Amino acid sequence: MKKFTATSFVASYLEAWNEQDAGSVTEHLCSNGHYIDEVLQEAMNKKTLFEELVEYFQSDHSFYEVTGDILSNGKTIAFQYCAKPMAPDSRAEVWHGAEFITLRGNSAFEIRDYYQLRAGLSRGQGGEGGVRYVKSGLRAEAMAQLLEALEHLMLEKQLYLDPDLSLPKLADCLNTTVNHVSQTINAGLQTTFFDYINQKRVEAAIKLMQSDSRSREAILDIALEVGFNSTSTFYSAFRKVTGQTPGSYRRRIKPAV
């Protein structure tokens, strides 16, 4: 049996990427391991990573290789890599990244991937065959469609009023994956799922405060009505959106109602 070393692990791991073999890539994770895309702030288990890689490899044509030393202390591995276009006549640029791996036995419990976007391109752009995220199967066109569907759903169904709304539940409503919804909100709207939903709730609360018939309603009642589970969460979100507390905001607008 071949002796396990950090060098052999990285060589096998990158070989799987270069062969565009989603199963072989994910086999480097232990059963409960996860891969974290630090740029998009996404954590994926083996199943989710496999599904993402199958889609990603359909459009990715990069060759990955180590640059510099592979560092290891027996429990962790760190290395830098570059991704070059496979086709010699490709106009795609070389891009770079680094991975930090936490081991559990001879498998990875956690893989954290940090990578740079290509020079001259904004966040999420690059690659051949259209604008796309460097290590995501989600293209800009699909993201735009998902953003449109998301906003339509919020406007028509007001899902943010559901206090039990979660990312998986929202993904089901949009008939897509949790990862794609999260990427769309993170990269397309430059915010997180919770901040996005809480902003919608705060906006709904402000409308209630501005209403003649609801202007004196208890703040707790307003918070619960727009989907918050507690006043503390409501106060925190309200201050984040408006820069002031709900009480201060209501006192400020009171002469106008």
Image (spheres, rainbow, N blue to C red):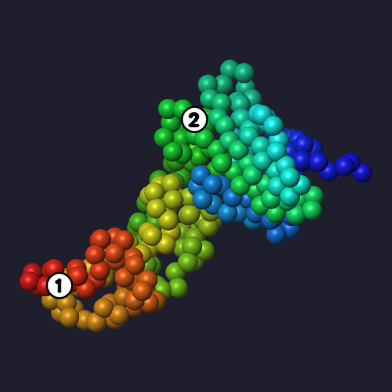
Which residue occupies the foreground of this view, 53 or 255?
255
What amino acid is labelled 2 in the image?
Arg
Element assignment for label 1 = helix
Q: Position of residue 127 (x, y in %)?
A: 52, 31
2 w.r.t. 126: above or below: below
For label 2, the SS is loop
Asked if residue 229 lies left or right of residue 7, the reply is left
- Residue holding disc 1: 251
Q: Residues within 10 Å of mark 1 (few under 14, many from 20)?
A: few
Q: Residue at x 63, y 32 (%)?
A: 81
24 over 200 or under it: above or below = above
Could you say where residue 147 lies in the image, as x and y percent from the top left? 39, 51
Counting labels gives 2
Q: Which quarter shows the C terminus?
A: bottom left
Q: Say if 160 sits above or below 83 in the image.
A: below
Q: Is residue 124 left or right of residue 112?
A: left
Q: Residue furthest left?
A: 255
Residue marked by disc 2 = 118
